[in-house]
Structure formats: structure tokens, C-alpha cells
Image: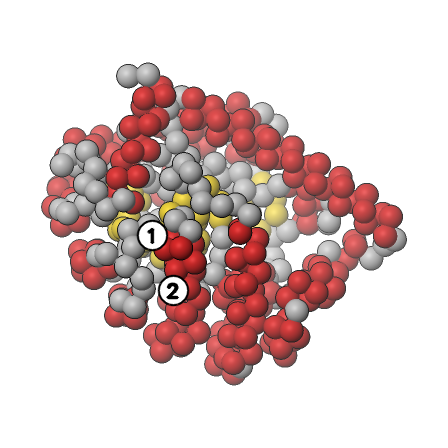
Amino acid sequence: MSKKALYDSRVKLFSDVMSNKIPERVPLWPFVETWVFHYANISVKDAFLKDNNLLFNAYKKFYDDIPVDALASFSNTVPFKMSENFGEGGIYTVNDQGVQIIGSHGKMMDGEELPELAKDVKAFFANVIAPRKFPKLDQSLEKNVDLIKRSLADLKAWGEYNGEVVQRWANDGMPLMIKATNYNPMDVVLDYLRDFVGISSDIRRRPTDLFAACEVIYDYVIELFLDMGTPADNKFLFSPLHVPTFMRPKDFEKLYFPFMKKYIEDFAVTRGYNLHFFMENDWMPYLDILQDLPETSKVVGLFELGDLKAIKEKMKGRMVFQGGLSANALKYYTLDQVRDNIKKTFDDLAPGGGFIYGTDFSLMNLNDGKPENLIEAFTFAKEYGKY
């Protein structure tokens, strides 16, 4: 089979699933992140900053040794050189082990400022948040313009550095299925504006202000992606869902769920995007609420915890289920136990389609999963998962 035919056959597995068809076999798609660099004995820092051949080769060794159907991410998601222009070099750092965040920089505003954000989100970000986050912007207009130009050039170079690798994977027959990352507005508030303590307080003390702020952030998020059009390559728009499982179900239903539902309606139902939600932690208490999501096969939910069979049955018609390979299996199981686990997982989850097999978490280093277990899991699953 040619590399082009191999690429097309792999993409077709996913397009069949997302079109509510039964594929030839269950697609195999783990989230491996920086695990691949440790497996290949390649420096993460060198791969990200010095030589994109190392970036390509780390993943190539992974997919040459382990029969997967797609990559989720190239891991090099922080444009370090661009960030240094704004004084951000001290927040993110990369070494041979991976990317780390130094300290907590999530709280950029107080809860009392939420109404001001809701009045004009763009003005608030430009005039309040940016100067706070980047004190270096306190200089002349001419210097700021030069800084922005230099930063855009660095961002372009970073995109080209990664883009070359993505194209080389494609030429080698391996698709990268995540097209871009987007956020639910409340996760924007958590990650970039209020941090965990702050948003927890807002949910209890000022839910009306929080909801109003999320409304304008949502509109801004939609605007950022309107010019992308509908992806023609069946790739995914990825969203990590950080906040929900730290909320009481009644708060989730009132404050978070309306935006999650609208997001699916706007992007998946109306515009035809494939969406990928990383459903962090345990969603069992929220499944009844999720029954009010639109019926569509254009959404994948990767569930970390819970009764997997019950989740798949409950979410049938609203989400394609991804997961099934647990951290315990990769860390502690014997090879026989790995195979027995796959048999039960596939017997429970594969019938009727709507199932993508993968890890239920992102692998960051070799302690997250023994290579021999990962190899055996996907080698066995490729054969056992045929329809």
C-alpha cells in the first residue's frame, strides 16, 4: 500500500465513525504527548527548539513500533521564542523532560471586574489584561509595534517549524487529527483570568456576573473561528474541559452546560466541524444533564473515568466514545492481562460503532506506561477490533 493510500485509509476510519458508519475496524488513537521522546531517547528541548528532525523522528519511532491510526498532537505547543519577547520566558520552560509552568500566573483579574469584562471583552483584554500580564508593553508605541512585528515573525517561524513535521508525517502515511484548539468560555476564565480558587469563588458568590462574562467571551471565541470555514479534511477542533467536574451538577447545568450545548450547535451541527472534548475526571454525575445535548455524530468525548459501558450507552447519538485503555493497565498489567482487558473493553464498547480506542489520559513520560504494554495493547486491538 502506498503512503497516500495508507493515509487515506486511516483518515477513513475516523470519517466513517464521525459519519455514523461502521468502520472496517475500531480506530486506534492514543494521546501520547512527550512520552514519545522518552521512548525514542530524544531530548524534548532539542526537538522543540533546535532540530525538527528530532520532533519528526520521535513520533515516527512511536508509530512505526506501535500500530496506531493517528496522532493527536505534536506536543510543541508553546512558541518559546515569541513568548520571550513579552517577558514570558520565566513562566514556561522546556528541558529534556518536557514543558513546565513555573509558578501560578492564572489570576489576572479580580471577580469584581467581571462586569467590566462583560461590557467590552476586546477592550478589557487589550487595556487591562495585556498590560498586567506583559509589563514590558509599558513603552512607546513605536517600540510596541516593533515588538509585535518581531513576535509575529517568531510565531510564523514556529508554525513553519511544526508545519514541516506535520506534512512529513502525512507524507509518511500518518495523519495528525487535531486541527486546532478552542476553549469553552468558562475554561478561558479559569486558565487565563481567575485561576481555580478565583473561579470557584465566582461560581458561589457572583454566578450572574460570571455567566455574563462568559457570554461575551463565547461570542469572541466564535468570532475568532468564523473565518476558518468548515474543515475539508475531517480533522478535529479540540477542547479540554477543565472546570465542569469541580462544579456541583446544578451549577454545571446552570453556568457551564448552556455554552457547551451552544458550542456544539454552532460548530458541529451548523458548521460541520468535528469536535473533540477531553472530558476530564469523572462525568458520571453529569450524564443526565448531557442528554439535552444535540443529537450528532460530530462530537468525540474522551472520558478519563467512570463506567465506560454506561457512558457509551448513555451518550449514544450525542458523542462518539473515546478511551478504554487505562493508566493501571499500562503501568501494572501483564501482557495476558492487557489482552484480556482489551477483549472485555471491545466486547462492551465496540458493538454498533461509535467507538475510538485510546488512552484515557495523556502519556507524558515512561512512568505513565510501559512500552511493552502499549505495543501489545494496540497490536492486539488492531486485530481484535475488526468488525
As helix, strand or loop, the secondary structure at mark 1 comes to: strand
Image check: 366 left or right of 114? left
- Against 185, residue 182 (above or below) is above
Q: Quadrant of the C terminus?
A: top left
Does residue 42 appear in this view?
no
Q: Quadrant of residue 315?
A: bottom left
Number of dots carrying numbers:
2
Cα separation between marks 2 and 1: 11 Å
Query: What residue type is disc 2 on?
Result: Lys
User: Where's residue 380, x and y in %?
Assistant: 18, 32
- Against 216, residue 370 (above or below) is above
Q: Say which mark, if any, is on residue 261.
A: 2
- In the image as oriented, which residue stretches furthest toward the bottom? 205
Q: At 31% from the left edge and 23% from the top edge, which residue is drawn?
A: 6
Tell me if mark 1 has few (under 14), some (14-19) or many (20+) residues whose alpha carbon lies within 10 angstroms of its own: many
User: Where's residue 303, x and y in %?
Assistant: 30, 55
* 232 vs 261, nearest the viewer: 232
Q: Quadrant of the N terminus?
A: top left
As helix, strand or loop, the secondary structure at mark 2 comes to: helix
- Against 59, residue 301 (above or below) is below
User: Where's residue 196, x and y in %?
Assistant: 51, 67
> What residue would you read off at disc 1?
299
Tell me if mark 2 has few (under 14), some (14-19) or many (20+) residues whose alpha carbon lies within 10 angstroms of its own: some
- In the image as oriented, which residue stretches furthest toward the top? 2
User: Where's residue 33, x and y in %?
Assistant: 43, 40
Query: What residue type is disc 1 on?
Result: Val
Image check: 236 left or right of 121? left
Q: Quadrant of residue 194?
A: bottom right
Ranked by sequence position, the earlier of labels 2 and 1 is 2
